[in-house]
Image: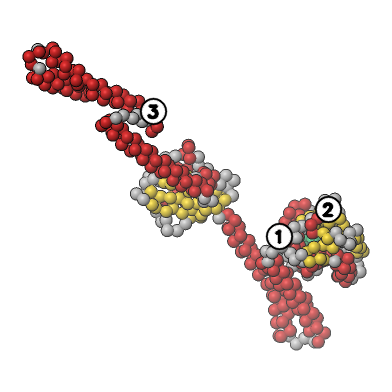
């Protein structure tokens, strides 16, 4: 404001002097009036435009830019173009920034940006969940105050960022395994990435357990067979004793064969992700076959009956389905003591589907075992399973086959009350045609 007034006064003095020199003979006052009058027109105009400009700056809206003629018009329109261009650039940068933020938020990995002091500059929602951070609360906090695991603090201090770091028991329920790695970027900043590897770790553990279980299952019959072979080789046995040992070796050989067969069945089921073949499975014939098999396995020591209310066919892969049904029936025979009752039922259900049920009057299963029965090699009665040639893989196969047919395996059992194993098929797996 001061500079405008001082400029105004200087201009005024100059104009007055000029007018006094030209119009000297009229005296000082008239020349001053003439000079002031002449000068005040552009000055008032400039002052008026300055006020409009100031109002525009206050409003901060490009559309509110005043227009004018002459030099002021030129200045204002240039200014408007400049402001528009700058606003456009700011909008583009903001949109790009938003897109980056959205991309980082969409990432399945936890992302934390750290400054040169390892303070949090930004993090995405996944990182908040993984590490229990709240960006609004924890921005500018040092990351090692928030992730207080000793292995992480050591990793950060040692600056050995070429390798990732595995941190276990993370997340809100302390059940996540996270693979964390720090990547330095511009001006001593760091990007911390955290990947959830919980499922991978579980799969690795399962694979290790599986290999250990298979080796254990194989080693037992192999050791027994080697023992017999050694005896036959080293001792001079009579032919009756030799015969006996060979029979025992045959039992162990058969045990290994069933194990390998069950493993191959499982591997085939897992490898083939396709839904089961849509062929018609004639249930009448299948049930008759199951009855023959069960009678042979039982040696007529059980009362085995078949009930078939639904003579419709089932749609699916006959070989897979027969192996699942036969596993359930053979389990019932193997685990039910002599004289027990076994009933195999094929019937329709209220929802338009159908179920295959095997009831037995056997020992039943305690509730704590029920959820784990379909795990590979899980056995309630280990010795009974081995004695009767079980591999511990039967129910795992049944569950796989059921899932591949969109069916559900349901197990109902109580200790001392027998068991019922049911495979429930949805209605579109049942061929209603007679
Ligand atoms: P296995 O080859 O040992 O029979 P399965 O996977 O078929 O393996 O069954 C797993 C376990 O479930 C068995 O070891 C047994 O303890 C239990 N089980 C299965 N069927 C029955 C049944 N009908 N009655 C009692 N226990 C059963």
**Mark 3–mark 1 distance (CA, rounded to whole Å):** 71 Å
Of residues 7 and 151, which is closer to you in this image? 7
Task: Say whether marks 3 and 2 touch (CB < 8 Å).
Answer: no
Q: Which is more foreground, mark 3 or mark 1?
A: 3
Q: Position of residue 433 (x, y in %)?
A: 86, 61
The residue tagged 2 is: 352
Of residues 141 and 104, which is closer to you in this image? 104
Label 1 lies in ligand 1 vicinity (Cβ under 8 Å) = no
Q: Which is more foreground, mark 3 or mark 2?
A: 3
Instruction: Tell whether 21 sits left or right of 430.
Output: left
Q: Residue at x 91, y 58 (%)?
A: 309
**Mark 3–mark 2 distance (CA, rounded to whole Å):** 71 Å
Residue 29 vertical placement versus 368 (above, below): above
Quadrant in the picture for residue 238: bottom right
Of residues 97 and 150, which is closer to you in this image? 97
The residue tagged 3 is: 59
Q: Crowding at label 1, few (<14), some or many (≥20) Cα neighbours within 10 Å?
A: some
Element at badge 2? loop
Q: Residue at x 89, y 62 (%)?
A: 434
Res 353 seen here:
yes
Ligand 1 shows up in the quarter that is bottom right
Query: Which label belongs to residue 375?
Result: 1
Quadrant in the picture for residue 335: bottom right
Residue 159 vertical placement versus 35 (above, below): below
Q: Which is more foreground, mark 1 or mark 2?
A: 2
Instruction: Tell whether 107 sits left or right of 316.
Output: left
Res 395 seen here:
no
Q: Residue at x 75, y 63 (%)?
A: 401
State which tag comes first along the sequence, 3 or 2.
Answer: 3
């Amino acid at each position: 404001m001061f500079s405008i007034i001082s400029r105004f006064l200087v201009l005024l003095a100059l104009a007055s002097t000029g007018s006094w020199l030209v119009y000297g003979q009229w005296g000082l006052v008239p020349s001053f009036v003439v000079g002031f009058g002449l000068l005040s027109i552009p000055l008032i105009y400039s002052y008026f435009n300055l006020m409009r400009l100031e109002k525009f700056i206050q409003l901060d809206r490009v559309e509110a830019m005043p227009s004018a003629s002459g030099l002021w018009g030129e200045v204002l329109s240039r200014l408007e173009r400049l402001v528009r261009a700058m606003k456009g650039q700011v909008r583009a940068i903001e949109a790009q920034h938003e897109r980056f933020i959205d991309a980082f938020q969409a990432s399945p990995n936890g992302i934390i940006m750290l400054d040169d002091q390892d303070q949090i500059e930004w993090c995405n929602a996944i990182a908040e969940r993984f590490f229990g951070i709240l960006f609004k609360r924890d921005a500018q906090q040092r990351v090692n105050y928030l992730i207080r695991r000793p292995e992480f603090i050591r990793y950060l201090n040692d600056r050995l960022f070429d390798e990732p770091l595995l941190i276990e028991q993370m997340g809100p329920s302390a059940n996540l395994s996270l693979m964390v790695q720090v990547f330095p970027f511009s001006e001593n900043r760091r990007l911390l990435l955290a990947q959830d590897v919980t499922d991978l770790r579980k799969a690795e553990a399962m694979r290790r357990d599986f290999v250990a279980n298979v080796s254990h299952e194989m080693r037992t019959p192999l050791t027994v067979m080697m023992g017999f072979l050694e005896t036959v080789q080293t001792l001079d046995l009579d032919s009756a004793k030799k015969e006996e040992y060979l029979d025992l070796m045959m039992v162990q050989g058969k045990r290994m064969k069933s194990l390998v067969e069950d493993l191959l069945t499982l591997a085939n089921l897992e490898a083939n992700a396709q839904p089961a073949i849509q062929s018609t499975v004639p249930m009448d014939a299948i049930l008759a076959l199951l009855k023959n098999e069960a009678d042979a396995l039982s040696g007529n020591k059980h009362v085995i009956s078949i009930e078939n209310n639904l003579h419709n066919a089932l749609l699916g892969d006959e070989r897979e389905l027969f192996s699942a049904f036969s596993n359930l029936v053979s389990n019932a025979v193997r685990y039910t003591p002599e004289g027990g009752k076994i009933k195999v039922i094929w019937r329709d259900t209220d929802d338009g589907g159908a179920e295959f049920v095997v009831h037995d009057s056997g020992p039943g299963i305690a509730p704590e075992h029920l959820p784990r029965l379909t795990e590979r090699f899980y056995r309630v009665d280990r010795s009974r399973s081995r004695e009767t040639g079980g591999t511990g893989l039967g129910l795992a196969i049944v569950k796989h086959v059921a899932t591949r047919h969109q069916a559900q395996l349901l197990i109902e059992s109580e200790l001392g009350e027998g068991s019922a194993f049911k495979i429930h098929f949805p209605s579109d797996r049942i061929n209603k045609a007679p």
